[in-house]
Image (cartoon, helix red, strand yellow):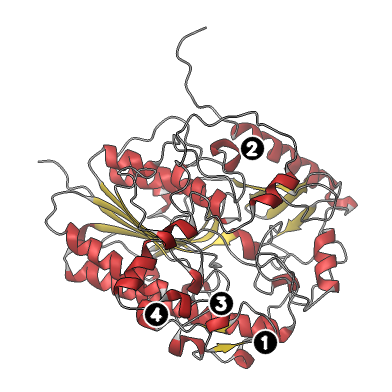
Amino acid sequence: MDKVKQNFLFIIADQLRADHVGFGGNSVVQTPNIDDLAARATQFNRAYVANPICMPNRASILTGRMPSVHGTRFNGIPLDRSAHTFVRELHNNGYHTGHIGKAHYQNLGDGPSGIVDKLFPVPGDALTSPHPDGWDQFEMHEAHQNAYVEMPPDYYGFQHTELLTHHSDLCAGHYYHWVKERGYDLRKLQGPANAKRRYDQWQQVYQTALPEEIYPTRYVADRSCRYLEDMVGSGNPFFLHVSFPDPHHPFTPPGKYYDMYEPASIDLPATFYDPHEASMPHYRFMTRRRGKIPKMWVAAFSPTEDQFRHAAAAEYGMISLIDHAVGQILATLDATGLAENTIVIFTSDHGDMFGDHGIMLKGAMHYEGAIRIPLLIARPEQAALQTEGLAGSLDLAQTLLELAGVPEYHGLQGVSLVPMLDDADVRVRTQVLIEEDEMFDMMLVGHPFRARTLITENERLSIYQHIEQGELFDLSEDPGELHNAWTDPSRRTNRNDLTEQLARELMNMADTSPKPTHMA
């Protein structure tokens, strides 16, 4: 008799730090449902991204390949239509595959193309797309507002796709029409102009006018529950990708969730007033301008204590609403009987500085707050376990394929975490490589930002293009990353060894795909 295949419920939040959940050590934010999941899961306390930005890391999760290899090096480059994904491989092996929520494998279209033309003035490109016009337009925010966008039957491996585009209370996608069917006009409810209350020191903190019952988090929960109900008795194992657009900024919790946390009760991070005496130039620039909001809404900055606390209170409200939604989805899993044969994964696409070292948001920052993510893998009837072994977003593709009993395919670059699931002492990695490329000169050195970071058991080494200075932190002695030892003469040998290790890992992560078709 064939073994029954496991189902998968993959839950991902957007820009959720590893320590902004109860199981991650946060004593203020209330996440009882996710904490209950953690209490029956393998909890990876040292899970890191392949890239600390949305599109590149989401594409790395899907493909099991580094951004420099799959091509989505930064936000603004759609994942190639021909990229193979572990989701497609699951479908090829009998799984029904569904996605509900934010995908962000393609552009949302919310940034002016004129900026790109100025940044990249040289005509043409070394690569040209073989795909037909429109292949990369399925997530365009405005298109979903103008008409219902029909999705292809294979969207990066997903057979069933229901999209949210953008973030927080600004979403469109198929959600836009779901709201419209319920008699609401989003144009009269979304954004700070329609907000019930606004925090006047930062325009990205406000109580949305959206009622809780039509807030995007509720859409994700309701549609996910419907998918699970439809899977009962279908005869197919399933992989459901549940993707919340929160708690990414702007911080816009609805109703009671806006007042759920009192800003004054939230402590400042221990590193909030990091003097940055040996830090990279952009940190010093931002902290000298503390409280000054940048014009570009996605750009990082240095907040005042009041700005930080109000943002944290609103973000915590968004997280608690996600937790409620997760509870609703898990309850449906139980009620349908599917929980007995479903593996549940919970993670995030990347973190957020959120006051660490006196900085908000992300971009050109490889501190722990931005690069470390929550990761839970809960199998039916397993014992709870916590591991300090290194893991990465890059590893999820191979891990899920192995758990599904599906062979991995050529070109995957991670490592399966399955050996770690039942033994806290097992290690499958000695290091994690993190890449980041950006369009802009975010480090103030006259060139677009590019960095490579190596995380080992005890250290972080980061090198940056167009600047000789780098970062070296001993995470065992300096977990707050306050003492950059890059220029410390006593650490020179250590720095050189880590640089060599980084070089070898970069070589290991060079592309081996496609396979050759002949000897010559």
Between label 3 and label 2, give the one nearer the viewer. Answer: 3
Between label 1 and label 4, give the one nearer the viewer. Answer: 1
Q: Which one is earlier in the sequence, the residue at label 1 or at label 3? A: 1
Residue visible at 52% across and 80% down? 316
Quick check: 28 left or right of 89? right
User: How far apart are the alpha carbons under marks 1 and 3?
Assistant: 13 Å
Which quarter of the rendering shows the N terminus?
top left
Q: Position of residue 38 (x, y in %)?
A: 40, 69
Residue visible at 56% across and 49% down? 56
Q: Secondary structure at mark 1?
A: loop
Amino acid type at circle 2 is Glu
Q: Which residue is mark 1?
A: 200
Whether residue 501 is situated above or below residue 366 in the rendered picture: above
Q: Which residue is mark 4?
A: 32
Pointer 1 and pointer 4: residues touching (CB < 8 Å)? no
Between label 2 and label 1, give the one nearer the viewer. Answer: 1
Q: Which one is earlier in the sequence, the residue at label 4 or at label 2? A: 4
Q: Secondary structure at mark 4?
A: helix
Quick check: 440 left or right of 401? right
Q: Which residue is mark 2?
A: 505
Q: Secondary structure at mark 2?
A: helix
Between label 1 and label 3, give the one nearer the viewer. Answer: 1
Quick check: 286 left or right of 260? right
The residue lying toward the viewer, choosing from 244 and 199, is: 199
Amino acid type at circle 4 is Pro
- Specify the label residue 251 is tagged with: 3
Amino acid type at circle 1 is Asp
